[in-house]
Amino acid sequence: TYERLLKVSVTQLGPPPPDNQPEEVVLNAYRNNDPVTIIYKDRKGTKTSRMVEPLKIETDPYSGVRRIKSYCRLRHAERTFLLERVVDAIPANTELSVISKDSL
C-alpha cells in the first residue's frame, strides 16, 4: 500500500560505481533527462529518499548554492532540493532492494 511505501527506502545492490559522487549522479540524470533516487538530508538533519526527475539546476548568484528543481514522485509535485544536501544518489536504471527506513 501507499502508506507502507512511505515507511521504506531503497538502497543500491552491490558496491557503488567508482568515482560517482552524488552531485555527479544527479547532474548526469539532469543531462540525460532520467529519474534518480536521492538520499537527502533536510535542514534538521533528517534523511529521506525520493525518486525525482530533475527539471532544472539553478545556482544562486550571491551564495553560489545550487538547487535542483525536480518533479518528486513521492509528493506528485515539483520540489526544490539543495544539491549540497544530497548525501547519496542512485541512477534510476540501478538494481535496487528495499530496506527499512531506520537504516537511513
Image (tube, grey):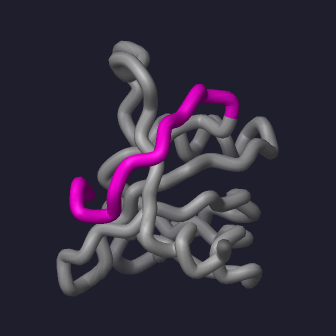
- What residue lies at 58% left-to-right and 43% top-to-bottom? 27
4 left or right of 52 in image: left
- Which residue occupies the foreground of this view, 89 or 99? 99
The quadrant of the picture occupied by the N terminus is bottom right
Residue 74 highlighted magenta (yes or no): no
Q: Which percent across, then down, holds residue 54?
A: 69, 58
Compared to residue 84, the image places residue 99 above or below, namely above
Compared to residue 99, the image places residue 9 above or below, namely below
Compared to residue 88, the image places residue 9 above or below, namely below
The quadrant of the picture occupied by the C terminus is bottom left
- What residue lies at 55% left-to-right and 45% top-to-bottom? 26
Q: Which percent across, then down, holds residue 56?
A: 70, 64
Q: How many marks?
A: 0
In the rendered image, the residue lying farthest to the top is 18
Residue 94 highlighted magenta (yes or no): yes
- What residue lies at 77% left-to-right and 36% top-to-bottom? 32
82 left or right of 56 in image: left
- The magenta segment: 93-104
- Which residue occupies the foreground of this view, 83 or 48? 48
In the rendered image, the residue lying farthest to the left is 45
Indicate the quadrant where residue 64 lies.
bottom left
Residue 55, visible in the rendered structure:
yes
- Which residue occupies the foreground of this view, 16 or 13? 13
- What residue lies at 71% left-to-right and 69% top-to-bottom? 73
Residue 19, visible in the rendered structure:
no
Q: Which percent across, then down, holds residue 57?
A: 62, 61
